[in-house]
């Protein structure tokens, strides 16, 4: 008999999250081989009287955070001794949480569960497996890593999306407003029952409209749904299992991306299926009858309250899963959990200012699958309540707290019409440095700007700033970086708007607006602080010969902060995008983006003309890009500590 093993598509899923305390939930899927861990989520709620998890709060959050099609299959704990004991505790915790997250619908008692134990000082991880809840012994198993984790997840699976706006009219007695909560709860229960109504119909179609071979939508009848069979026992259909009857069609019937000769494997490029809910409120009758209207007078004075809900469920399904089971076991449970979650959030403030709740789906870096987050839109993204919500999510997902990875602008877009948010009008060139020739530094270590930026230069948008606007253009490039990384949503300012900002803070006189006066590093730092709340570090050099001495410090900036740097020298300004530095020899080169370019936005022309490229501190002819008789200052914008 083959020995069991734990399969981990990506080693970083576990190794990067070893923390001295706390518990991490191991996430798998019934559509993967048993004991396959695709992600980990940190347990962030604990019982106030003990260190054990608060299972109620954890399960409430995970039921909507996790896409249906993923579930808890184990837990990881950090410990230095008695590994089997701690593994048993992790397994017991995972079983308990798993039952709550699945609502008791899955037979977890007889399923294998993983208990992983990691050493606190960055040591290895040992995996133990419990065959069933009644088992008192655990098997220590090996771990196998996948070579291509994205392909592992998305070659076999697809995304199913169901969007459902709801308006629930609530009639409650004027003299007993507290009844409104009970009435809303009953209305929610009535909606849930409608999901399973035989009269309900589910229209299934592809979201991928790029192919000419788009299959026709199909309808799944409510009476054909199967709510009894456990998802782990559902038999997947093969490609040859297609049938004219919608009941026997697999999800792969609507998967067009996988039919392309070349494709990318990620959530953004996954096959997407749309499900829409229809309800037949009338019935066929053998008899012809006139419509009947019934009148039920209210026994006391009442008021009406209309509660708006916006549900948007995203699920992960194997392509071989039948559409009937996809709707029965994924879409409808997802709608029920999300409706109950938003209903519970609304209840405390039902008669006051109700929260405006909206679900968003994110696929943060390092995650192989999306997660769903419900935000309150009553609060702006920079307001403290929203910030605290995102901090909590960053903690659970193991994301850095100085990157805005879960802002609304980061959400997955299913409309196919989202425009580029960084620029009104024409689209500018992005990331011009990609694909340029190497620097020529032998044995050097390259440190580059992290993330995307737009290239701003002279004469763009028909505005003639030749001879005086290079620092303005460098500033625009820097601000575009903050926009593209979602630190801000403001438009990249025009020259006049930059001047207006400097006047408003008292740095310049009103006559400065509309002038052609130069600005330098200090003015740029003022504008970044005013418009973005970004602080900057300024480095001053008496001569260009001093710049290579700071290559190590500049490399650390790109590795830790990752923002573009403005270089000012006399009346000239440039944007620094990276350095290539050999620590042993001292040889170095600077990746310069030159705003003095006046031509068309053609990448080849810009690179071949040297407007974006590496500049050696000292070239083969002994010449230096930075003049020895010129004073230079560098503006290093600091990445905000924000989520």
Image: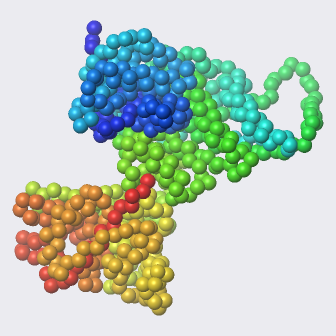
616 versus 631 height, above or below: above
584 displayed left or right of 377: left
Which residue is painted at 38% across and 87% down in the image?
517
Which residue is painted at 55% across and 20% down in the image?
104
Instruction: Find residue 641 and report its image quarter.
Output: bottom left
442 versus 347 height, above or below: below
Q: Is residue 157 visible?
A: no
Nearest to the observer: residue 211 or residue 291: 291
114 displayed left or right of 532: left
Which residue is painted at 74% across and 31% down in the image?
186
Residue 621 in the image, given as x and y percentages of width and height? 6, 74
Residue 81 in the image, given as x and y percentages of width and height? 26, 26
78 displayed left or right of 320: left
374 versus 486 height, above or below: above
Residue 344 in the image, given as x and y percentages of width and height? 64, 38
Q: Can residue 546 be seen in this view?
A: yes
Figure label count: 0
Instruction: Find residue 545 and report its image quarter.
Output: bottom left
Which residue is situated farthest in the top direction here? Answer: 1
The quarter of the rendered structure image containing the N terminus is top left
Nearest to the observer: residue 566 or residue 385: 385
Which residue is situated farthest in the front direction here? Answer: 49
Which residue is painted at 48% across and 23% down in the image?
96
Residue 183 in the image, given as x and y percentages of width and height? 77, 35
């Amino acid at each position: 008999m083959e020995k069991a093993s734990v399969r981990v598509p990506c080693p970083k899923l576990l190794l990067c999250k070893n923390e001295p305390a706390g518990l991490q939930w191991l996430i798998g899927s019934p559509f993967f081989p048993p004991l396959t861990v695709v992600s980990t989520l940190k347990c962030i709620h604990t019982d106030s009287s003990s260190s054990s998890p608060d299972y109620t709060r954890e399960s409430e959050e995970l039921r909507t955070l996790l896409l249906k099609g993923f579930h808890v299959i184990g837990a990881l704990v950090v410990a230095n001794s008695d590994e089997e004991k701690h593994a048993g505790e992790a397994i017991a915790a995972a079983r308990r949480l798993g039952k709550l997250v699945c609502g008791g619908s899955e037979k977890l008692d007889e399923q294998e569960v993983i208990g992983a134990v990691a050493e606190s000082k960055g040591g290895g991880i040992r995996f133990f497996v419990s065959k069933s809840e009644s088992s008192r012994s655990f098997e220590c198993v090996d771990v196998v890593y996948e070579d291509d984790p994205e392909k592992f997840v998305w070659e076999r699976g697809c995304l199913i999306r169901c969007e459902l706006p709801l308006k629930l009219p609530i009639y409650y007695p004027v003299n007993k407003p507290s009844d409104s909560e009970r009435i809303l709860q009953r209305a929610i229960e009535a909606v849930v029952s409608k999901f399973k109504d035989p009269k309900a119909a589910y229209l299934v179609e592809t979201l991928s409209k790029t192919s000419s071979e788009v299959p026709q939508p199909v309808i799944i009848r409510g009476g054909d749904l199967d709510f009894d069979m456990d998802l782990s026992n559902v038999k997947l259909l093969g490609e040859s299992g297609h049938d004219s009857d919608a009941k026997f069609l697999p999800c792969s019937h609507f998967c067009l991306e996988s039919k392309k000769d070349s494709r990318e494997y990620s959530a953004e490029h996954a096959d997407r299926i749309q499900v829409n809910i229809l309800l037949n409120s009338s019935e066929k009758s053998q008899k012809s009858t006139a419509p009947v209207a019934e009148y039920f007078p209210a026994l006391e004075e009442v008021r009406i309250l209309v509660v708006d809900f916006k549900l948007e469920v995203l699920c992960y399904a194997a392509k071989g899963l039948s559409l009937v089971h996809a709707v029965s076991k994924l879409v409808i449970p997802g709608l029920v959990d999300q409706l109950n979650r938003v209903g519970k959030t609304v209840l405390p403030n039902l008669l006051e200012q109700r929260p405006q709740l909206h679900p968003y789906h994110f696929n943060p870096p390092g995650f192989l699958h999306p997660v769903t987050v419900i935000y309150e839109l009553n609060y702006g993204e920079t307001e403290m309540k929203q910030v605290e919500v995102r901090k909590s999510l960053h903690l659970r997902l193991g994301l850095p707290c100085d990157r805005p990875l879960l802002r609304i602008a980061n959400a997955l877009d299913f409309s196919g019409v989202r425009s580029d948010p960084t620029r009104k009008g024409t689209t500018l060139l992005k990331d011009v440095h990609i694909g340029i020739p190497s620097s020529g530094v032998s044995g050097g270590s390259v440190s580059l700007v992290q993330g995307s930026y737009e290239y701003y230069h002279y004469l763009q948008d028909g505005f003639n700033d030749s001879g005086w606007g290079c620092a303005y253009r460098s500033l625009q490039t820097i601000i575009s970086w903050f926009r593209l990384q979602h630190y801000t949503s403001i438009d990249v300012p025009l020259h006049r708007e930059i001047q207006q900002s400097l006047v408003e803070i008292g740095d310049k006189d009103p006559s400065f607006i509309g002038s052609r006066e130069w600005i330098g590093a200090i003015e740029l730092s003022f504008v970044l602080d005013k418009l973005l709340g970004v602080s900057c570090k300024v480095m001053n050099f008496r001569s260009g010969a001093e710049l290579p001495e700071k290559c190590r410090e500049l490399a650390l900036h790109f590795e830790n902060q990752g923002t573009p740097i403005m270089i000012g020298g006399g009346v000239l300004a440039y944007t620094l995008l990276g350095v290539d530095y050999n620590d042993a020899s001292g040889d170095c080169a600077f990746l310069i983006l030159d705003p003095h370019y006046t031509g068309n936005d053609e990448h080849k022309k810009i690179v071949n003309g040297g407007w974006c490229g590496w500049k050696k501190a000292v070239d083969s002819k002994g010449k230096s890009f930075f003049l020895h008789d010129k004073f230079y200052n560098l503006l290093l914008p600091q990445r905000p500590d924000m989520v």
